[in-house]
Amino acid sequence: MSKKHGKHHRGQKHDDGVTESADLNGSNRLSPPRWAGVIAGNAPTMPGGHASVSVRAAPGIVTVEPGAPFDLQAVDPRTDNGLDKDWTKDALAKERARIDALQERLYAERARSLLLVFQAIDTGGKDGTIRSVLKGVNPQGCAVTSFKVPSTDERDHDFLWRYHARTPARGMIGVFNRSHYEDVLVVRVKGLVPDAVWQSRYGQINDFERLLTESGTTILKFFLHISKAEQKKRLEARIADPEKHWKFDPADLVERKSWDDYQQAFGDALTRCSTPDAPWLVVPADHKWFRNYVIARTVADTLEAMDPRFPEAPQGIADLTVPD
Ligand code: AMP
Ligand code: MG
């Protein structure tokens, strides 16, 4: 709730002075923090002074109940929840327009942020979802990061370091294409660290996400759930279509052999890291049109629940005239 608080949230990189990139990333050292509009209202307030915002999952998405046992295999990836494909075309356009309008308010308010986390098995649809759901959003208010195999520099730090550096600044929508969850998924399945190391990460992830939410970041975590048969179809399409060859990674065929291990690792991550403020949302994702619509609606509804407001106008603005 102070300059110090804001500085901390944006990371240490810009602490040496005001730089151009610090400004672009949402730093505003000259004006006071704009918490007033955030704290107003009757919503419960968290330690960081921010109102707690409930995630609003669209019908058809399965929210993993915090603390309860959860069986990923019980969720049918092929379901469309009775929606009509043609109907969702217009409906998706409407959700995109809502996201665009609400994003402008979030940006103008410059007090809180939204983080969208996408996890899925290879070919699960992360790229396609990001492209579809965020179509039309002002690129300046949005920052997408695709996390790959960590660099030497990244591996020389704690596992959360590289993710924390990319969390959204105030006013921004941040998108994680893969995320800190890779460190309990691929890392576990491939045995890249000792068991005790990845096992301790679930709690560390929960603490990290709590820090973010208490600092004014609402987190939406989407797990795109596809069937093994659908993955086969998508891999075959990438092999058959020359325009999709660039997307085909022969390593995906190797990873497919570990399908069951990945499902187990996904199931454990979803169960152990679903919390009241940052629950996991399982999206049946065999049907791309269904996936895109329910995710867009969830983003729009959650932004609406955040209720971002334009900042108060400077006093006397209505009386000003612009000289010739
Ligand atoms: P893609 O998303 O298809 O471009 O591939 C990125 C690759 O990076 C995938 O094979 C991931 O499993 C891998 N990857 C992402 N994060 C990590 C991580 N923390 N440790 C190891 N591999 C990772
Ligand atoms: Mg890949």
Image (spheres, grey):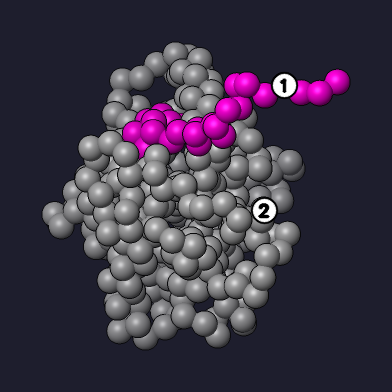
Judge: label 1 CB < 8 Å from ligand 1.
Answer: no
Q: Which residue is mark 2?
A: 24
- Mark identifier at residue 321: 1
Residue 258 versus residue 29: which sits nearer the camera?
A: 29
Q: What quarter of the picture does the N terminus occupy?
A: bottom left
Q: Is residue 282 left or right of residue 30?
A: left
In the displayed structure, 34 sits above or below 187; it is: above
Q: Secondary structure at mark 2?
A: helix
The reply to whether dot 2 and dot 1 touch (C-beta < 8 Å) is no
Q: Which residues are magenta?
A: 296-324
* Residue 79 x %, y %: 32, 31
Q: Is residue 230 above or below residue 156?
A: above
Q: Measured from the top left, where is residue 4 in percent x and y?
A: 47, 67
Q: Is residue 109 visible?
A: yes
Residue 62 — which label? none
Crowdedness near tag 1: few (<14), some (14–19) or many (≥20) residues, C-alpha within 10 Å: few
Answer whether residue 111 is magenta in the image.
no
Q: What's the amino acid at mark 2?
A: Leu
Q: Position of residue 162 (x, y in %)?
A: 54, 70
Quarter placement of the C terminus: top right
User: Please, is residue 27 above or below residue 230 in the view?
Assistant: below
Q: Secondary structure at mark 1?
A: loop
6 or 251: nearer the viewer: 6
